[in-house]
């Protein structure tokens, strides 16, 4: 039915089957949209946030998707600037995942703020001292870059590509993509960093505050580094899921191994820095303002030391080691385990840097603040996931996302 | 023109680009944000000319001077009035929130008549005619004495008008709700004779021995007490607080002395004994004692030996002695009675025993001491014209010494003792212990008329409501009550026209009398309440209308008074918490929750701690030591001999083990989502116990049990 | 007409030994500043109270328990080194909250705020409140609203302004009166004038004739133990909340009771004993 749109030679499921899948995920999407409309029209009382939990599930989701979307800028950087050519086989997909992550982040922000129609004040009345201003500017610019990076892939659609203008446009855009990749890497460096800065500059919040370099607290660098380290894991994870769902191999093992290896080394270096940071914070920064480390991990029913161990050791050190070690890296099961742990690890880090920050009592007579998100928050957080699945399904179906797909599935295609 | 794909795409892109660079987008973006800044459902208060009115707050017996800021005549803020002789700047939260009462969702906005358990609005003319018809029939049937009347006080011209009405009508049954002032007056009357009341010069005393008096919880005139406490801190004057719980007053005190609830009277007696045996009493004053000084002395020594009282109170014998001696040796000691706010159920024995401590020190009618003040009658009502119905009726016996006794008598009698009842500015169906008894008595009364501003529990139980303007909409003289050293009368003035179709109760009473006609009308010759006030308060009117207040007496009274110990020498019985449960439930007076009329404002409720009220549940205080198996914040069932309630538990290290504290002022059942339907009315859990000798309810608590719900 | 250009530094001292926890300051603030209320205000984490009164205990068991009340308006933080980079001001991306260098007051511009709540997260005192709901008054009750302070719309943050409109009125009056000088009693906040216990003292910390200055005796030099801290009190009974963070609040607290003063900040085990007698250097006097 839609055969004319499907990349030449590629095998796709039947249109009705495709639409059925889309409809199921679309139902979840509509649920999220309903919750989103509730938040817009009735206000943020639809959430369980409160004056202690001013930042909650959404901001975590925001930071998390940006972190795991970091695969786009980092893969782009490697491919276009450091000329790691094998990565051309996964860059399209990395860009799409990045696009999904960043558009989701912007959508979440639009739901999260109390006055969405005034959202642009962040640009118009910008306060240069605010990390959030830096985030907003870099995030928007980088989203534009991602869109530009995404366009050539769209134009490669079988029908669009027949239009000579689009054909040439796509071709020429590929040619200058290094410039955009460089711009994107630069922008990403800052907004990933400034997201880290968002927490690190909070000198009223002893759990978050970090010393640093010039105006940038250490979290600035840690966030950038961790996004670069863990982002590719998410790209690999989604690739693996796509392969599982489509029942096809889409990217060659050597590409996967390479990206996993780079990611592994990044994780290892990051986690060393993170451990040093944590030790310095726990032994110098926090005690300097009167806090024992135990203050942040005891006397409440949720935030125990387990979260620190999980984030740093189980979801940091372990995946790092698994990925730098050739034998474990090339073992599909262990590699999958490593990338899953890594993705959890970076998400947990963002959770801690948003939610634990506000949960910890600061005034000596304050108490821990715990919160459980409302269904509206959960639905609007799942909304981008549904949207992401649909976008991946559509792009996979109609665009030549994986250059190695035909080659890898040739025999099967010929057999049938 | 043939629209091919190229030109279509070109057109589309062109249009998008065109709109993007045109100012339309920017304009819409800007407009939408401006729209959010002017949402029509977010009110914009109109601006105007600022003016200030002086008046007096009469939300509690404190009678603070207030200043009302108005914008084009519209009141927007209440603040304490500087240089007012009661509060001298500053006001309590209830006074400051006073404007909320004007627009309270529970306000009675027009006269209402109950038809088949529902209230229907009627006109004032119909309402007065209805009441007059009823009362006329009672009088005609020689039943005048079966009209009863409950007011919040017996002072001031509005209470005076009710009293005047009752006399002229022919009924002795005018009752006053128990307030600190009524207890103080009763104490003074018992020890010194009729016409006296007590005042305490807390501003100058150097040692205050408080028997649970919540001077920071709303006792007396709250703002004046707060100021006295602050000046006390500066003067380094001592405060010893004897109380079962670490109240705010106890926390501010130099010493907190926990005491077993209900034994305060015994403690005061024992301390009297210490003063007598240690020869620490003022002999000059002792010489003037009537009623057998030696008899009193012997009784105290015999019945209240320090060791015995130590066991009952939980305070060691040595401490009792030390405290009593420290008190007696102070230069300007004052002992103050009246637990919590000092209203509601109290014990005359306790008041008398505490006041006796003051008498024994001799620091009476001196600066920094206790003032035995004549009740200043600045009002001169003409004698009512008494026809035979009035004379007959008025001569009949009163239905009891207190509202509570009247309620008991009505419920116990087969005859209709009361056929009509007026209630003014009181909520007995909520504030009396075991209010179900009050409601049952109200059921038996065929015609209950409520003079109320709000649809509260008592108004709901009445047959006719004659709505009263709030203190911001009416004229009224308000004499200072509640234990102040000075005697001041202030003038509450209307700062705006009545918001609804309401009137001053004074006007309504006069109108009612006029409608009844005959001698009743002749007793109420004034055209309206204002004329009446100017007439009966003529002696102080110039000051009242000029300054907004008149100072009736200042400084220590000069007349000498006699003291009689007859009441105490008979060793009246002490009322302990009743029942067989192991724990004791006692009410907590909390400054942020009024216990009587009017109920709390939304602002006041908003300030209540989540350790007191959580959602719709009241939290009861209990020492973790006593909290056998209960968890902090968990639900529990509280049971007393009178009833049981579902509550939450609030662990408090500052309450004596064995005691459960529950706040007063919650559990209202009227229709105001901000204030009512929250928590439990503690009075529902306590049964009244009439104290012999006073005839008043003295049940300051009850025994209780608590278990996990 | 904006004449009084001298740099003031408005601040408060709250005497915790006098404070009775009565809540008049809270209600006066709510009434003065058109703060709304809703059906259930018992969840204190979403209950707008610019002035919140905390009840604190010494943590001891019966009968050694003690309590104190601690009223908490916005602390009008001067930020690290008292340079005006308050925790909240420095983070607001839209400049919707600002530091007044002429007054020391941290302002909040409701019509500018777009509700990102970053400022709330940055404030360790929980002094900032979000309008989760539209403010709704029972029918007719909006008639008592004051025109001096605009009611806030849903979706924005609000907080104590040190009754800025009273400052504006005082400034205008000073101009009309030709004095150009705002007298101490001409500008007093609504909580100060309401307090029946006289526990709140408000004025210009920069002005030696004002009571706040005389009580606090602020040390204008950085604290040698922590260079971020400026304006430490030279009165041993006076302290600030979380002073060690370097937020430099302009609200000071006073108590004779050591346990109360200790509650003002966080200390490692044994640390309090070492620093409890360290206050603003007398040598700077
Ligand atoms: N601290 C502080 N600073 C502020 C503000 C604030 O709220 N606080 N507000 C800011 C704002 S919003 C504004 S608009 C500015 C206003 O600040 P300015 O523009 O300085 O306003 P004014 O002082 O009201 O007026 C300026 C001068 O104009 C004179 N004037 C009046 N009528 C005329 C006329 O017809 N012709 C001429 N030539 N002169 C005339 C007045 O006498 C006065 O001397 O201040 C800003 N600065
Ligand atoms: N009387 C008088 N009227 C004027 C002017 C004047 O100088 N005097 N100037 C005119 C001019 S130029 C302008 S721009 C408009 C401005 O008029 P508006 O935009 O109304 O500005 P303001 O009255 O300054 O502030 C608005 C409200 O914000 C409240 N607010 C709360 N917190 C803060 C805070 O932290 N800071 C500030 N600034 N306000 C706070 C104030 O109390 C006030 O109620 O007024 C115009 N009208
Ligand atoms: S203490 Fe009583 S009289 Fe004074 S302001 Fe409060 S409610 Fe009114
Ligand atoms: S008004 Fe004064 S005494 Fe009452 S809580 Fe506020 S500061 Fe304390
Ligand atoms: S107390 Fe909070 S809101 Fe106030 S200035 Fe300090 S950080 Fe900002
Ligand atoms: S919530 Fe408003 S004031 Fe706070 S940081 Fe965001 S925009 Fe600024
Ligand atoms: S200074 Fe004004 S705004 Fe701040 S708490 Fe006091 S009354 Fe409220
Ligand atoms: Mo302006």
Image: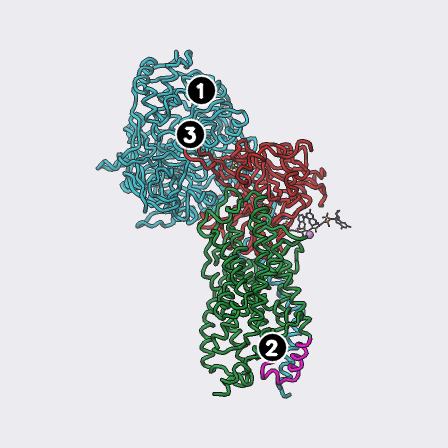
Q: Is mark 3 on a helix, strand or loop?
A: loop
Q: How far apart are marks 3 and 2 (CA)?
A: 82 Å
Position of the N terminus of chain C, as image quadrant, is top right
Q: Quadrant of residue A72?
A: bottom right
- Residue C281: where, in percent of width, then height? 66, 33
For label 1, the residue is B326
Q: Please determine whether, in this image, residue A264 is positioned above or below residue B521.
A: below
Q: Colour of chain C?
A: red
Is residue B12 magenta-colored?
no
**Disc 3 crowd, CA 10 A, few/some/many (<14, 14-19, 20+):** many
Q: Chain A is drawn in which colour?
A: green
Residue span colored magenta: A150-175
The residue most toward the front is A327
* Residue at mark 1: chain: B
- Which chain is assigned cyan? B
Q: How many marks?
A: 3
Is residue A171 magenta-colored?
yes
Q: Is residue A33 left or right of residue B191?
A: right
- Residue C145: where, in percent of width, then height? 54, 48
For label 2, the residue is A153
**Does mark 3 fall on the same chain as mark 1?**
yes
* Residue at mark 3: chain: B
Q: Which mark is residue B213?
A: 3
Viewer-closest of A75 and B576 = A75
Q: In which quarter of the image is residue A231?
A: bottom right
């Amino acid at each position: 039915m839609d055969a004319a749109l499907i990349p030449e030679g590629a095998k796709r499921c039947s249109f009705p089957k495709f639409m059925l899948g889309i409809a199921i995920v679309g139902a979840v999407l509509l649920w999220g949209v309903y919750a989103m409309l509730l938040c817009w029209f009735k206000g943020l009382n639809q959430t369980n946030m409160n004056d202690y939990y001013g930042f909650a599930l959404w901001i975590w989701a925001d930071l998390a998707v940006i972190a795991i979307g970091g695969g786009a800028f980092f893969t782009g950087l490697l491919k276009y600037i450091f000329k790691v050519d094998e990565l051309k086989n996964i860059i399209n997909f990395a860009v799409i995942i990045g696009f999904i992550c960043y558009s989701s982040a912007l959508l979440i922000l639009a739901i999260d703020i109390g006055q969405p129609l005034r959202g642009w004040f962040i640009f118009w009345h910008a306060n240069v001292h605010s990390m959030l201003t830096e985030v907003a500017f870099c995030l928007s610019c980088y989203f534009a870059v991602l869109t530009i990076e995404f366009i050539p892939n769209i134009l490669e659609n079988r029908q669009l590509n027949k239009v000579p203008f689009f054909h040439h446009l796509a071709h020429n855009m590929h040619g200058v993509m290094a410039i955009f990749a460089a711009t994107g890497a630069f922008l990403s460096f800052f907004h990933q960093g400034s997201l880290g800065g968002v927490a690190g500059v909070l000198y009223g919040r002893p759990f978050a505050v970090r010393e640093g370099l010039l105006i940038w607290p250490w979290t600035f660098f840690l966030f950038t580094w961790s996004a670069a380290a863990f982002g590719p894991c998410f790209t690999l994870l989604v690739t693996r899921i796509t392969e599982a769902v489509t029942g096809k191999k889409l990217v060659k093992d050597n590409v996967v191994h390479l990206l996993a290896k780079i990611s592994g080394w990044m994780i290892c270096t990051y986690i060393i820095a993170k451990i040093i940071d944590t030790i310095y914070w726990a032994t110098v920064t926090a005690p300097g303002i009167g806090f024992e480390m135990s203050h942040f991990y005891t006397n409440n029913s949720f935030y125990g030391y387990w979260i620190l161990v999980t984030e740093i050791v189980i979801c940091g050190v372990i995946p790092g080691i698994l990925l730098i070690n050739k034998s474990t890296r090339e073992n599909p099961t262990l590699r999958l385990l490593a990338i899953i742990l890594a993705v959890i690890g970076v998400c947990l880090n963002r959770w801690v840097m948003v939610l634990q920050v506000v949960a910890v009592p600061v005034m000596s007579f304050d108490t821990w603040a715990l919160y459980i998100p409302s269904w509206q928050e959960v639905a609007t957080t799942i909304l981008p996931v549904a949207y992401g699945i649909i976008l991946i399904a559509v792009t996979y179906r109609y665009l030549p996302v994986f250059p190695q797909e035909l080659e890898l599935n040739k025999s099967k295609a010929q057999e049938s | 023109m043939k629209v091919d794909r190229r030109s279509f795409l070109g057109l589309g892109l062109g249009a998008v680009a065109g709109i993007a660079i045109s100012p339309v987008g920017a304009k819409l973006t800007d407009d939408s944000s401006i729209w959010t800044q002017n949402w029509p459902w977010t009110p914009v208060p109109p601006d105007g000319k600022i003016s200030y009115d002086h008046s007096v707050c009469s939300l509690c017996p404190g009678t603070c001077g207030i200043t009302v800021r108005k914008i084009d005549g519209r009141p927007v803020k209440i603040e304490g009035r500087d240089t007012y002789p009661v509060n001298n700047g500053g006001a309590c939260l209830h006074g400051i929130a006073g404007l909320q009462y004007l627009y309270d969702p529970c306000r009675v906005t027009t006269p209402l008549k109950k038809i088949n358990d529902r209230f229907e609005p009627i006109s004032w003319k119909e309402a007065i005619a209805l009441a007059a018809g009823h009362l006329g029939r009672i009088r005609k049937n020689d039943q005048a004495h079966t009209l009863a009347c409950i007011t919040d006080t017996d002072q001031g011209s509005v209470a005076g008008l009710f009293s005047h009405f009752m006399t002229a009508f022919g009924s002795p049954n005018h009752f006053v709700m128990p307030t600190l002032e009524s207890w103080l007056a009763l104490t003074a009357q018992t020890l010194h004779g009729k016409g006296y009341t007590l005042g305490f010069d807390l501003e100058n005393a150097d040692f205050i021995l408080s028997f649970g008096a919540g001077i920071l919880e709303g006792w007396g005139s709250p703002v004046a007490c707060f100021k006295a406490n602050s000046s006390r801190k500066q003067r380094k004057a001592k405060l010893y607080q004897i109380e079962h719980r670490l109240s705010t007053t106890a926390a501010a005190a130099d010493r907190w002395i926990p005491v077993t609830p209900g034994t305060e009277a015994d403690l005061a007696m024992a301390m009297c004994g210490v003063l007598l045996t240690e020869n620490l009493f003022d002999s000059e004053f002792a010489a003037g004692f009537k009623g057998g000084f030696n008899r009193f002395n012997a009784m105290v020594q015999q019945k209240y030996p320090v060791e015995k009282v130590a066991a009952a109170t939980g305070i060691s014998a040595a401490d009792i002695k030390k405290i009593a001696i420290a008190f007696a040796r102070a230069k300007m000691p004052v002992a103050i009675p009246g637990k919590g706010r000092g209203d509601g159920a109290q014990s005359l024995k306790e008041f008398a025993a505490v006041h006796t401590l003051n008498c024994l020190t001799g620091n009476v009618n001196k600066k920094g001491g206790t003032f035995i003040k004549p009740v200043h009658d600045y009002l001169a009502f003409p004698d009512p014209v008494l026809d035979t119905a009035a004379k007959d009726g008025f001569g009949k016996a009163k239905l009891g010494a207190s509202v509570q006794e009247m309620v008991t008598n009505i419920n116990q009698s087969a005859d209709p003792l009361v056929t009509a009842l007026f209630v003014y500015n009181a909520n007995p169906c909520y504030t009396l212990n075991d209010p179900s008894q009050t409601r049952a008595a109200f059921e038996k009364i065929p015609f209950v008329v409520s003079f109320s501003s709000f649809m509260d529990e008592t108004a709901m139980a009445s047959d006719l409501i004659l709505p009263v303007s709030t203190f911001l909409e009416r004229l009224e003289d308000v004499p200072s009550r509640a234990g102040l050293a000075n005697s001041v009368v202030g003038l509450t003035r209307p700062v705006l026209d009545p918001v609804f179709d309401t009137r001053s109760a004074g006007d309504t009473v006069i109108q009612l009398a006029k409608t009844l006609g005959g001698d009743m009308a002749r007793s109420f010759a004034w055209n309206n309440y204002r004329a009446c006030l100017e007439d009966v308060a003529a002696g102080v009117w110039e000051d009242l209308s000029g300054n907004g207040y008149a100072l009736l007496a200042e400084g220590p009274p000069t007349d000498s008074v006699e003291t009689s110990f007859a009441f105490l020498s008979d060793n009246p019985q002490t009322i302990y918490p009743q029942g067989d449960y192991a724990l004791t439930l006692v009410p907590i007076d909390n400054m942020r929750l009024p216990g009587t009329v009017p109920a709390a404002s939304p602002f006041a409720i908003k300030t209540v701690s989540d350790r007191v009220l959580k959602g719709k549940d009241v939290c009861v205080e209990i020492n973790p030591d006593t909290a056998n198996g209960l968890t902090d914040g968990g639900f529990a069932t509280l049971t007393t001999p009178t009833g049981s309630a579902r509550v939450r538990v609030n662990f408090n290290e500052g309450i004596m083990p064995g005691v459960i504290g529950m706040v007063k002022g919650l559990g209202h059942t009227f229709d105001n989502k901000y204030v009512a339907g929250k928590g439990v009315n503690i009075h529902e859990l306590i049964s009244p116990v009439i104290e012999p000798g006073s005839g008043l309810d003295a049940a300051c608590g009850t025994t209780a049990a608590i278990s996990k719900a | 007409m904006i004449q009084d250009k001298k740099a003031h530094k408005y601040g408060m001292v709250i005497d915790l030994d006098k404070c009775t926890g009565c809540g008049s300051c809270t209600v006066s603030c709510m009434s003065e500043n058109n703060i709304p209320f809703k059906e259930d205000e018992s969840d204190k984490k979403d209950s707008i109270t610019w002035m919140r009164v905390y009840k604190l205990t010494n943590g001891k068991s019966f009968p050694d328990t003690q309590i104190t009340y601690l009223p908490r308006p916005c602390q009008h933080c001067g930020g690290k080194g008292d340079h005006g980079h308050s925790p909240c001001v420095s983070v607001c991306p839209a400049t919707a909250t600002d530091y007044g260098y002429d007054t020391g007051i941290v302002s909040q511009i409701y019509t500018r705020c777009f509700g990102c709540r970053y400022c709330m997260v940055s404030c360790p005192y929980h002094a900032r409140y979000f309008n989760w709901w539209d403010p709704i008054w029972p029918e007719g009750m909006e008639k008592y609203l004051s025109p001096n302070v605009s009611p806030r719309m849903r979706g924005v943050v609000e907080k104590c302004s040190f009754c800025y409109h009273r400052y504006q009125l005082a400034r205008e009056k000073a101009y009309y009166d030709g004095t150009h000088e705002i007298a101490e009693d001409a500008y007093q906040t609504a909580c100060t004038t309401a307090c029946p216990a006289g526990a709140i003292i408000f004025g210009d910390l920069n002005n030696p004739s004002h009571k706040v200055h005389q009580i606090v005796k602020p040390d204008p030099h950085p604290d040698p133990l922590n260079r971020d801290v400026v304006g430490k009190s030279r009165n041993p009974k006076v302290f600030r909340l979380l002073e060690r963070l370097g937020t430099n609040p302009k609200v000071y607290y006073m108590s004779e009771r050591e346990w109360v003063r200790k509650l003002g900040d966080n200390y490692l085990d044994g640390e309090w004993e070492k620093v409890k007698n360290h206050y603003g250097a007398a040598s700077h006097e």
